[in-house]
Image (tube, rainbow, N blue to C red):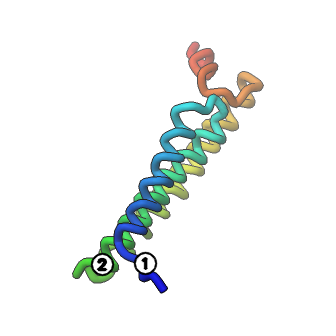
Amino acid sequence: MAEITLQHYLVTGAVLFSLGLFAVMTRRNAVAVLMGIELILNAANINFVAFSKYTAGGLNGQVFSVFVIVLAAAEAAVAMAIILALYYNLKTIYVDEADRMRG
């Protein structure tokens, strides 16, 4: 049975980061962009925990991951409030039409 190494975690994190970056760059829908950002943050969490496990970092990776999770929750709340305001004012959730909100 093959052992899971640091490289496996790094490849998984890189794939998640790439998928998140692709979602952020190609989607017009604000909710899909938000999901891409969450994928990017989760890729960072995987890397933090993997480096903490395979180096003498102790619990530093887990602590950073908790901070990233708290940051992601706050970011999601603020972003959803912005998306709701965009929909309330313009009846659309496409991010390329958000510049019409300027007064």
Task: Say if residue 63 shows up in the picture.
Answer: no
For marks 2 and 1, give the one nearer the viewer: 1
Q: Residue at x 52, y 46 (%)?
A: 20
User: In the rendered view, would you say 88 is above or below 54?
Assistant: above
Residue 54 numbered tag: 2
User: In this orientation, which residue lies closer to the viewer: 2 or 31?
Assistant: 2
Q: Position of residue 61 (x, y in %)?
A: 34, 72
Mark 2 is surrounded, within 10 Å at the Cα level, by few (under 14), some (14 to 19) or many (20 or more) other residues, namely few
Residue extending farthest front: 1
Left or right: 57 in relation to 11: left
Judging by the rendered image, the residue that carries numbered circle 1 is: 4
Q: Do the numbered discs 2 and 1 sit on residues whose CB atoms are within 8 Å?
A: no
Residue extending farthest bottom: 1
Q: Quadrant of residue 92?
A: top right
Q: Amino acid at mark 1?
A: Ile
Left or right: 55 in relation to 13: left
Q: Residue at x 45, y 82 (%)?
A: 2
User: In the rendered view, would you say 91 is above or below 11?
Assistant: above
User: In the rendered view, would you say 29 is above or below 48?
Assistant: above
Residue extending farthest left: 56
Q: Residue at x 58, y 39 (%)?
A: 33
Q: Position of residue 10 (x, y in %)?
A: 38, 63
Which label's residue is closer to the chain start, 2 or 1? 1
Marks 2 and 1, how far apart at CA = 11 Å
Mark 1 is surrounded, within 10 Å at the Cα level, by few (under 14), some (14 to 19) or many (20 or more) other residues, namely few
Left or right: 24 in relation to 61: right
Q: Position of residue 98 (x, y in %)?
A: 60, 22
Q: Amino acid at mark 2?
A: Tyr
Residue 13 numbered tag: none
Q: Quadrant of residue 50?
A: bottom left
Q: Residue at x 30, y 78 (%)?
A: 54
For label 2, the SS is helix
